[in-house]
Image: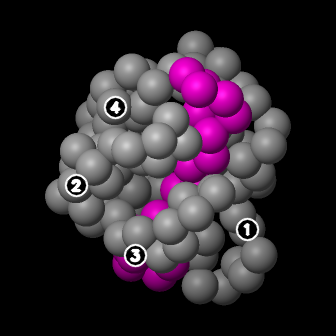
Amino acid sequence: MTMFELPEELVSRLNELGFALAEGDQPYTFIRFMLGGELRLLIQAVRADRWRVGLASRATQEPGRLPNPFLAVPLERFGPSPDGTTLELSAAGLRTDLLDVLEDCLLPGWDMGSG
């Protein structure tokens, strides 16, 4: 594995959360379908220990609403915006913080229809 490849355990956990890898290069693009639309997760290596993660929902009636993986937003300022949310994480944070935020905070709300 090179420093810019996603760890296999991260891809496996994202699969368990319902995300499928749609494009496997920079940025990595994962899609999770939900009622009335989809979630898109873009993951891009910035340097050896930094990753940018873009997350946005796109309703079937709202074509073109995607995350911007090039605008870093610190994790502590995580929040929704019209264009999605972008986080900058360490390699360790990619394996822990990202999964925690998705599994414990975001996906339950989206799955209940409030996303």
Query: Is the residue 77 above or below the residue 72 in the image?
Result: above
Lower position in the chain sequence, tag 4 or tag 3: 3
Residue 12, given in percent of the width and then of the height, sits at 22, 54
Q: Is residue 42 left or right of residue 114?
A: right
What label sits on residue 33 in the rendered view? 3
Question: In this picture, which residue range is highlighted in magenta?
Answer: 30-51
Task: Give the prevailing secondary structure in the magenta stretch.
Answer: strand
Real-space Cα distance between discs 4 and 3? 22 Å
Q: What is the three-letter code of the residue carrying label 2? A: Ser
Most extreme residue toward the right is 71
Secondary structure beneath label 3: strand
Task: Say whether marks 2 and 4 touch (CB < 8 Å).
Answer: no
- Nearer the observer: mark 3 or 2; the answer is 2
Lower position in the chain sequence, tag 3 or tag 2: 2
Most extreme residue toward the left is 16
Q: Quadrant of residue 11?
A: bottom left
